[in-house]
Image (cartoon, helix red, strand yellow):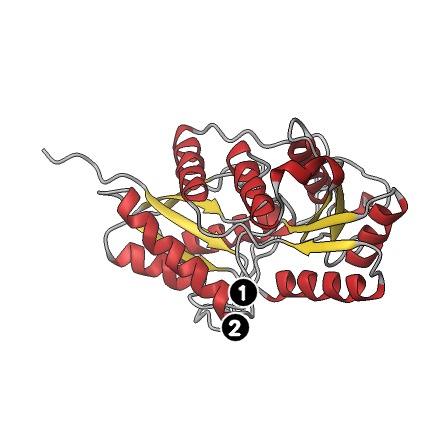
């Protein structure tokens, strides 16, 4: 009697208009296959980049997969992780009767990724200069206050024990402070050397914007030394963390924080979000874009079975 096939690992990305960033995701997915012998591995995007999630699922189903553990390749639990991806998984379950999905939690903040951030910092800064250096950790930014708070948490964890003068936070879209305002805050707090550290996994439009805005601010403030670090990239630590999230999902050990989720708690200014229905993004290349929306409340705090 043959043993049942282990659940497939399905990596889910948001998508980017940057070809290099999309290729980095696809290459990372390919590399994970070597880390999980005997497990089917696939990955797709909910919008903007090929392959769409629907194609990734269809390919795995055609190869015999019926059970999936889906891991969102995102750093914080914002609208995509809480709503778009779980709703998209429900849509795929409807397309492929007999399939089931366990949903993992986002990646950060995690000590493994803090190690990678520290490495990117050391690539542009002598560790001996940390005490006179302020870091500006720049996240994507969200309309979800819970997601933005996670970037602040990562900044504080990066500050702890590493001997830096400080770690401030900024966002490149949808939230304040933006990159120039974040740099100005560092300056007003007395910083004379700032490292701009992007809180992004891969290259893309937004990390490029962070770099450009930091360069423009630095040109206008020659009295402050501004160094720009690279994105985290497809490191061994990231691969290990994805496998950790995969195994968590299989065990049902998904420790999501509901205390400050705007879909469950009436946060000031976001009261209308409580209990709001979640609907999936529809990828322009998705052959099933005409399918009906899933109207139930089903965000990332619960499994999509």
- 219 up-or-down from 176: above or below: below
Q: Position of residue 260 (x, y in %)?
A: 73, 34
> Left or right of 282: which side holds 193?
right
Residue 150 lies left or right of residue 107; in this view the side is right
Q: Is residue 220 above or below residue 43?
A: below
Q: Earlier in the sequence, mark 1 or mark 2?
A: 1
Q: Secondary structure at mark 2?
A: loop
| Nearer to us: label 1 or label 2 | 1
Q: Residues within 10 Å of mark 2 (few under 14, many from 20)?
A: some
Instruction: Give residue 247's position: percent from left, percent from top.
Output: 39, 33
Q: Are marks 1 and 2 in contact (CB under 8 Å)?
A: yes
The local crowd at label 1, few if under 14, some if 14 to 19, many if 20 or more residues have their Cα within 10 Å, is many
Residue situated in front as seen by the camera: 126 or 10? 126
Residue at image point 40% right, 28% down: 251
Q: At x 82% / y 45%, what residue is drawn? A: 191
User: Residue 59 appears in which quarter of the rendering?
Assistant: bottom left
Quarter containing the C terminus:
top left
Q: Viewer-proximal residue, 228 or 51?
A: 228
Residue to which mark 2 is pinned: 284
Q: Which of these two is toward me, 34 or 183? A: 183
The image position of residue 292, as x and y in percent, is 54, 62
Please give left or right for residue 181 compared with residue 36 in the image: right
Front-most of residues 18 and 258: 18
**Local secondary structure at mark 1:** loop
Counting every numbered tag in the picture gives 2
Q: Which residue is mark 1?
A: 47
Left or right: where 115 falls relative to 30: right
Report, in whole angstroms, how far the alpha carbon at label 1 lies from the one at label 2: 7 Å
- Residue 298 visible: no
């Amino acid at each position: 009697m043959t043993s049942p096939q282990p659940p497939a690992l399905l990596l889910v990305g948001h998508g980017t208009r940057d070809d290099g960033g999309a290729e980095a995701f696809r290459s990372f997915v390919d590399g994970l296959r070597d880390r999980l012998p005997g497990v089917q591995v696939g990955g797709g995007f909910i919008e903007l980049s090929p392959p769409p999630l629907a194609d990734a699922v269809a390919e795995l189903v055609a190869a015999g997969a019926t059970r999936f553990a889906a891991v969102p390749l995102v750093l914080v639990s914002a609208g995509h992780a809480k709503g778009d991806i779980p709703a998209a998984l429900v849509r795929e379950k409807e397309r492929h009767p007999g399939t089931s999905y366990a949903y993992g939690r986002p990646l950060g903040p995690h000590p493994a990724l803090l190690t990678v951030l520290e490495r990117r910092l050391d690539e542009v800064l002598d560790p001996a200069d940390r005490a006179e250096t302020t870091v500006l950790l720049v996240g994507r930014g969200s309309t979800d206050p819970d997601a933005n708070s996670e970037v602040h948490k990562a900044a504080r964890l990066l500050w702890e024990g590493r001997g830096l003068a400080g770690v401030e936070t900024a966002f490149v879209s949808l939230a304040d402070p933006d990159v120039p305002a974040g740099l100005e805050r560092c300056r007003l707090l007395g910083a004379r050397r700032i490292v701009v550290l992007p809180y992004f996994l891969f290259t893309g439009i937004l990390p490029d914007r962070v770099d450009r805005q930091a360069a423009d601010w630095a040109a206008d403030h020659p009295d402050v030394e501004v160094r720009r670090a690279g994105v985290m990239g497809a490191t061994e630590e990231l691969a290990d963390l994805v496998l950790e999230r995969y195994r968590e999902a299989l065990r049902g050990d998904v420790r999501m924080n509901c205390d400050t989720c705007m879909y469950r708690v009436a946060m000031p200014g976001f009261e209308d979000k409580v209990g709001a229905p979640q609907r999936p993004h529809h990828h322009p290349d998705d052959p099933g874009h005409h399918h009906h929306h899933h109207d139930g409340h089903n965000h990332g705090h619960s499994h999509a079975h």
